[in-house]
């Protein structure tokens, strides 16, 4: 140490000893500024700020010293100095953060967690929720059994759109469903599906989660996988839920089960007949055999009650979606005749005749065409259809190529559909 610096230190000490605290602080400040590495003098200056009741000045000086020791690897001295700052100013974020990190480094996780929680409260107080979320998440990892803290971290993560963190701290099936909904809303549907599957690993019988997963799978076009997650008992006695299951089972190729659930639903809840008929019509272009079974189920229900018109209307809607379905057309003709629905019967006969001819069943098509012509001898459409059928008979069916009607959808097994 130079003689000049020794003299300056002695002069500062005299000022302090004679009670001239402000002057002494100025003198020691000059000394520290000249040689920042003189930490002994820096510590004395920090203490003088405290004696002068200048908390911020003292904290600033102590922080500078603690930071220096931390960077030099003198972690114990740094830790004790940060704690000294917190004894003076408990809300100091700089000291809280570094004290937490040093405590954790030294294996003092309980104390480190306490510092982190205090830091998070300060961050929240100044509306820095992003930083608070990071701090609380770190604290939660130190004690995963603290469910209240993890719940708090989860809620903040969802609100901030931090889905990875929300997923990490999700505690319940409802938590996972909420994150999945947020992922789906953000356009991350594959991630949402993965999370719902994860939720079912924890809680395989949670029906709302099953329903949510099935809906997302159906929306992505993966009805077969969606159907794998369903069981008939899941819907309970709710007819709407049952019919939703019927639809997914149909889409997933489990047609026998779908028909069985629909049959039991109709038996338990007769009012579901309209919904079953609508489902039959919507399924007609895709799984025709199963759709025919559903349509017949609804039709039989109405006919048992002599309700011809709703039965005919449902069948009309069906053949609109599947105009070549001979089974549905035959049934429509029968219902219309039994119900004295003349115009409906005639129109259904026309469609049936065209379907027969298009499917190569020329004799059946000719018989219906001749019946229609006999009933309406002045209708040129009927006469043309009769001529077409005769030409097809003469040509062995080749004439159908030029005047083909809507192609008949052949009956197929549910598996083939």
Image: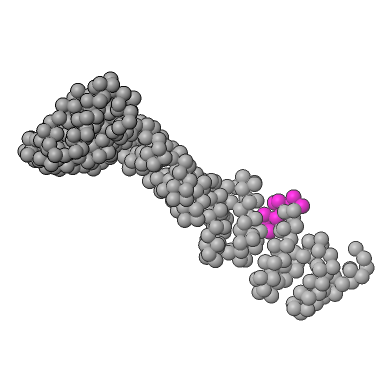
Compared across the picture, whether 10 is left or right of 47 comes to: right
Q: Residue at x 43, y 37 (%)?
A: 198
The x and y percentages for residue 351 are 21, 35
| Viewer-side residue, 97 vs 53 | 97
Compared across the picture, whether 276 is left or right of 111 comes to: left
The image quadrant of residue 268 is: top left
Q: Residue at x 92, y 70 (%)?
A: 4
| Viewer-side residue, 109 vs 266 | 266
Q: Residue at x 65, y 71 (%)?
A: 55
Q: Main secondary structure of the magenta part?
A: helix
The image quadrant of residue 275 is: top left
State the scheme by which the image is colored.
Answer: one colour
Q: Residue at x 31, y 40 (%)?
A: 207
The image quadrant of residue 39 is: bottom right
Quadrant of image for the N terminus: bottom right
Kindly tell me whether residue 214 is visible in this rendering: yes
| Viewer-side residue, 377 vs 90 | 377
The x and y percentages for residue 49 are 70, 71
Kindly tell me whether residue 151 is visible in this rendering: no
The x and y percentages for residue 250 are 30, 33
Quadrant of image for the C terminus: top left
| Viewer-side residue, 3 vs 78 | 78
Residue 73 on the magenta segment: yes
The x and y percentages for residue 125 are 52, 65
Q: Which residues are magenta?
A: 72-81
Is residue 143 positioned above or below 18 on the image? above
Residue 83 on the magenta segment: no
């Amino acid at each position: 140490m130079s003689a000049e610096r020794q003299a300056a230190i002695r002069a500062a000490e005299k000022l302090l000893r004679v009670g001239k605290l402000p002057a002494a602080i100025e003198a020691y400040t000059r000394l520290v500024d000249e040689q920042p590495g003189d930490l002994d003098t820096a510590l004395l200056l920090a203490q003088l700020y405290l004696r002068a009741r200048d908390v911020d000045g003292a904290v600033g000086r102590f922080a500078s010293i603690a930071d220096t020791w931390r960077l030099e690897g003198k972690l114990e001295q740094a830790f004790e100095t940060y704690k000294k700052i917190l004894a003076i100013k408990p809300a100091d974020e700089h000291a809280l953060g570094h004290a937490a990190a040093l405590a954790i480094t030294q294996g003092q996780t309980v104390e480190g967690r306490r510092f982190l929680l205090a830091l998070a409260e300060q961050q929240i107080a100044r509306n820095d929720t992003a930083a608070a979320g990071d701090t609380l998440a770190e604290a939660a990892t130190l004690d995963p059994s603290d469910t209240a803290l993890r719940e708090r971290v989860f809620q903040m993560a969802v609100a901030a759109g931090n889905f990875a963190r929300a997923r990490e701290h999700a505690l319940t099936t409802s938590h996972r469903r909420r994150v999945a909904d947020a992922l789906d809303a953000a356009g991350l549907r594959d991630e949402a599906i993965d999370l719902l599957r994860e939720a079912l690993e924890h809680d395989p019988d949670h029906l709302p989660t099953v329903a949510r997963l099935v809906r997302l799978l159906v929306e992505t076009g993966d009805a077969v996988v969606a159907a794998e997650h369903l069981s008939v008992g899941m819907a309970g006695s709710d007819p709407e839920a049952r019919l939703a299951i019927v639809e997914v089972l149909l889409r997933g190729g489990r047609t026998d089960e779908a028909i069985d659930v629909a049959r039991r639903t109709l038996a338990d809840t007769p009012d579901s007949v309209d919904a079953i008929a609508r489902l039959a019509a919507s399924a007609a272009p895709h799984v025709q055999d199963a759709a025919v079974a559903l349509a017949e189920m609804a039709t039989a229900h109405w006919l048992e009650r002599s309700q011809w018109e709703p039965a005919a209307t449902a069948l009309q809607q069906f053949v609109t979606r599947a105009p070549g379905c001979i089974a549905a057309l035959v049934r429509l003709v029968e219902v219309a005749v039994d119900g004295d629905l003349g115009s409906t019967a005639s129109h259904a006969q026309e469609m049936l005749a065209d379907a027969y001819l298009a499917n190569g069943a020329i004799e059946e098509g000719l018989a219906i065409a001749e019946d229609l012509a006999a009933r309406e001898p002045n209708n040129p459409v009927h006469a043309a259809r009769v001529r077409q059928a005769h030409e097809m008979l003469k040509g062995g069916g080749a004439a159908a190529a030029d005047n083909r009607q809507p192609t008949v959808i052949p009956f197929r097994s549910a598996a083939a559909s």
